Image: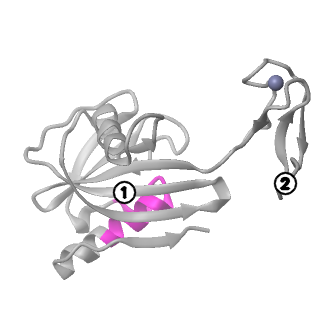
Amino acid sequence: RRRLKFCSACGSAEIGLTVPEGDHRERYVCRHCSTIHYRNPLIVCGVVPVFEDRVMLCRRGIEPRFGKWTLPAGFMENGESVEEGALRELAEEACATVNLGPLLTVLSVPYISQVHMMYLGEMTEAKYATTPESTEIQLFREEEIPWKELAFRTVKTALEHFFECRRQGQYSLKRAKIE
Ligand code: ZN
């Protein structure tokens, strides 16, 4: 992530990387007002939207991975629950709604300091629409999934786990570290 340039508390540009007293890691600390700017992992939440025997994927209309296929997901916002975030992202990216099911994946992605959490979502109708973020939306059967054209490894992991669970007839939580 980018270097912090300005203090969000006082606006000063005098920010240095130092280990605060009692801490064990370097943090961005404002030399002007002493505010410590902690930077911690971000949560990405999303949905594996399922309609009958098909999964909905979106073709990305934005970078990164422009043109690749993804599951509707995005950064959780302040003031919302993970479930609310997952449903909001689905609405924003695909104008769709689902009945939210069990949590399918908790994937730690330490090299980009993110945690990806994907829920099962049951669509009661095949209703969706493209948005600036998603230039194409399509429902895929397992054998139709564009595995080589997926945007992120977390998406691949979530899809593989979903199909495995469906074969087993039981949904479980997949936990993994993506390196
Ligand atoms: Zn400051």
Q: Left or right of 128: which side holds 28?
A: right
Quadrant in which the C terminus is drawn: bottom right
Q: Nearer the viewer, mark 1 or mark 2?
A: 2
Under circle 2, the secondary element is loop
| Alpha carbons under labels 1 and 2: distance apart | 36 Å
Classify 10 Å Cα crowding around label 1: few (below 14), some (14-19), many (20 and above).
many
Locate residue 86, reporting x and y percent: 34, 45
Residue 103, above or below 61: below
Chain part drawn in magenta:
146-161
Question: Quarter for ligand 1?
Answer: top right
Observer-nearest of 64 and 46: 46
Which residue carries the number 1 mark?
118
Is 151 magenta? The answer is yes
Is 92 magenta? The answer is no
Q: Residue at x 33, y 29 (%)?
A: 131
Which residue carries the number 2 mark?
22
Locate residue 122, reporting x and y percent: 16, 53
